Image (cartoon, rainbow, N blue to C red):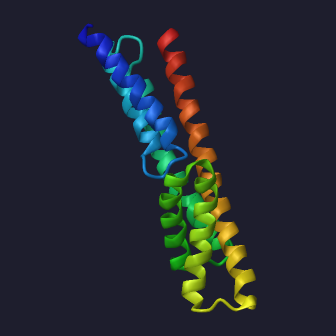
Amino acid sequence: MTAEWLLYLLAGLLVLAGLAGTVLPALPGVPLVFAGLLVAAWTDGFERVSWGWLALLGVLTLSSIVVDLWAGAAGAKRVGASRLAVVGATVGTLGGLFLGPLGLLAGPFLGALGGELLHRRSIEARHMGDAAKIGFGTWLGLLLGAVLKLALAFAMLGLFGLAWWL
């Protein structure tokens, strides 16, 4: 096994972990994809993928961070979520990691719902409807962010492939 082969393997593992991280909140998805692409370009001595291409990929990586922050906040703000609802959605997402795909879908919603109910300090029926609406809006914002990050990650892979084979 050569060092070059090991570096390409590392690059591939970083990219795969990054793709998983676009939907799993515990991993910095798109930055890991970028790190993998950077390792692959570096291993090749930047002969196939130049610094210009890497700068473009870096801009897309920074864009993904902005998208991530914006999507979650926009979803929560649009439905009038409290700070506790947003914290609850984050905690619910992290807790959902341990429950598989269903946990990842239900965790943010349940966390935002619980956070909003804590904020209101009430579980009366009139507050449940508002809290459910806030939970859904926050969940939808997080889902939108994950979809946009995944799209950016695949765009980066496409641009990298284009640069590699040009």
Q: Nearer the viewer, residue 113 or 32?
A: 113
**Residue 148 horizontal side relative to residue 9, left or right:** right
Residue 47 picture quarter: top left
Residue 54 picture quarter: top left
Q: Position of residue 145 (x, y in %)?
A: 59, 52
Q: Nearer the viewer, residue 78 or 6?
A: 6
Q: Position of residue 107 (x, y in %)?
A: 58, 62
In the rendered image of this protein, does residue 105 appear above or below residue 58? below
Q: Nearer the viewer, residue 144 or 95?
A: 95
Residue 75 picture quarter: bottom right
In the rendered image of this protein, does residue 76 appear above or below residue 145? below
**Residue 79 horizontal side relative to residue 91, left or right:** right
Determine the residue positioned at 41% across, 17% down: 49
Q: Position of residue 72 (x, y in %)?
A: 57, 62
Residue 45: tell me if it is visible: no
Outermost residue on the front side: it is: 99
Quadrant where the N terminus sits is top left
Q: Position of residue 84 (x, y in %)?
A: 51, 78
Residue 148: tell me if it is visible: yes
Q: How many marks?
A: 0
In the rendered image of this protein, does residue 71 appear above or below residue 124? above
**Residue 158 horizontal side relative to residue 137, left or right:** left
Determine the residue positioned at 56% across, 66% down: 73
In the rendered image of this protein, does residue 38 appear above or below residue 69? above
